[in-house]
Amino acid sequence: MSDRSPAGEQLHTPRLSLQRPTEADIDAILAIHRDPETCLHNPSDALTRLDEAGELYRRWNDQWQRCGYGYWVVRRHGSALQLGFCGIKPMELQGMKVLNLFYRFATSAWGQGLAGEAATAVAAWAFRNVPDIPLIARVRPANIASQRVAVRAGLTRAEHLDGTGYDGYDWIYAAGLPH
């Protein structure tokens, strides 16, 4: 399967369906990113207006068109309700090309293992389809739940890559780093 395969637009886990976002998901993008709890550790990601959510959707969609992968909308099988978002984005970290693993879920979905399940599926997809680019997660030291998700997805602490990020000091979790 190539990076740009349409098969990558949908992923499935035992409980979840992950699909490429559409314009119909913009309201959910706003709802999840407007909740102060969901952006507590990443306040620069907080949104307040529908046009901001539309712009975020357009950036996500542009990445899908450029790369053939991006962020997925996460739902339970058979449900239209968006639980959150999980995916990967190419970026640079200390001069190295990496894929950043992202996950953000509505507070109603917290504590059920759903973020870990989605992140594990996305990481497995990345390992299969983009194996030459290391996968990382940037996590605030105080965000214990996010650290658990990164570990569940197969990443381990890479202290030598820790550093200041957009919203404070980032702990880096990684897999597939060059030796």
Image: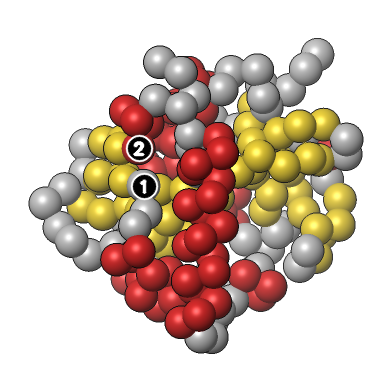
Vertical side of 46 occupied by 92: above or below: above
Disc 2 to disc 1, how far (Cα)?
5 Å
Q: Residues within 10 Å of mark 2 (few under 14, many from 20)?
A: some
Whether residue 140 is visible, yes or no, is yes
Whether residue 151 is visible, yes or no, is no
**Image disc number at residue 98:** none
Q: Amino acid at mark 1?
A: Arg
Q: Residue at x 50, y 41 (%)?
A: 65
The image shows a total of numbered marks equal to: 2
Quadrant where the N terminus lies?
top left
Q: What residue is shown with label 1?
A: 20
Q: Residues within 10 Å of mark 1 (few under 14, many from 20)?
A: many
Q: What residue is shown with label 2?
A: 9
Left or right: 138 with respect to 22? right
Q: Amino acid at mark 2?
A: Glu
Q: Check contact, mark 2 vs mark 1: CB within 8 A.
A: yes
Give x and y (percent) for residue 120.
43, 35
Q: 25 and 164: which one is in front?
A: 25
